[in-house]
Amino acid sequence: MRGPPASSGASRLPAPAPPLARLFLSPGATLFLGPVAQAARHRHHAAQISLGLEAPVQIDTGDGPRPARYARIPANQPHAFDGGGHLQLVILLEGQSAAGKAVSAGGIQLSQALPPDRPALPCDIAGAREILRWALEGIAAPGAAPTDRRIARVLAHLRDPRDQAVDAQALAGLAALSKSRFLALFRAQTGLPLRRYILWRRILAAVQATSRGADLTQAAHRGGFADSAHFSRVFRENFGLQPSLVLKNSQFIQVMVDLAS
């Protein structure tokens, strides 16, 4: 039974908070879980897997918008999309990684059906790793944490992204390997070439800084970038969006960084 109308002097209830989105980052892979609206035509170095969890996403890869619940988009493929504000899971994979190359090699793929047996939506790093394994099943194996002690020693040395003096020969010496053997083993262990791994660590450090309250300039310096413009340019090249658009409402985006990968 409908109650009496509220008096004009009654205080309004506070507007509901926007849905909380989650952003998971690790070297070579980014997962975004949350409502997605529109993105104009863009391209990025990452290969992309998108899942419309509540409704199809309108995706335009050059021949007009098409609805899809599941999409795979190669690295550097121009595209636009409209998610209608519905819940989506978006996975971005470094284009030079084994997983990114495998997704790109399959070309553009759009489907009206979601893959079966989806794990629970991630709320922590372990859940993000699990859903990444599920998303890559039959495509590529996700990278595992390095197990070689020599590479682990180098990764510990690279922990601070503000150290700009990164020399492959010096790092090979730290690992007690020749330069060529070191670069091959590093890629096998981390899934990324040395330079791309270092770049991802710098991006992760900057994003993590914004999640702790830093502005873009402070975050850029924490990641070893010259300034916020430099960080914004690198972020846009890799993810297709300005970091300010993704991170400006950090109170509504829960950011988790996985540095163990």
Image (tube, rainbow, N blue to C red):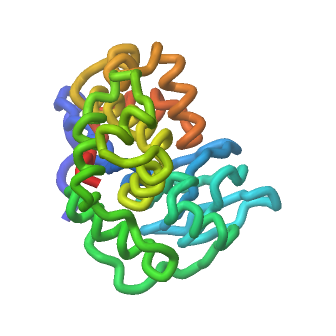
Image location (x, y in percent) of residue 16: 26, 43
Q: What residue lies at 24% left-to-right and 61% top-to-bottom?
A: 147
Q: Residue at x 82, y 61 (%)?
A: 63
Q: Is any atom of residue 182 visible in this view?
A: yes
- 191 vs 67, left or right, is left
**Residue shown at the point (51%, 34%) measured from the top left:** 235
**Which of these two is toward me, 214 or 6?**
214
Does residue 155 sit above or below 53 in this rendering? above
Residue 118 location (% of width, % of height): 35, 78
Quadrant in the rendering for residue 131: bottom left
Where residue 207 sits: x, y (%)? 34, 33
The mark total stands at: 0
Q: Is residue 254 visible?
A: no
- Compared with residue 161, is residue 195 higher up or lower down, i.e. above or below? below
Query: Against 143, is 41 above or below?
Result: above
Q: Nearer the viewer, residue 230 or 154?
A: 154
**87 to the left or right of 49:** left
Question: Which corner quadrant holds the C terminus?
Answer: bottom left
Residue 236 picture location, percent across and down = 56, 34
The residue at 34%/22% (across/down) is 162
Residue at the right extreme of this rendering: 63
| Quarter of the image that includes the N terminus | bottom left
Picture quadrant where residue 154 is located: top left
Compared across the picture, whether 77 is left or right of 69 comes to right
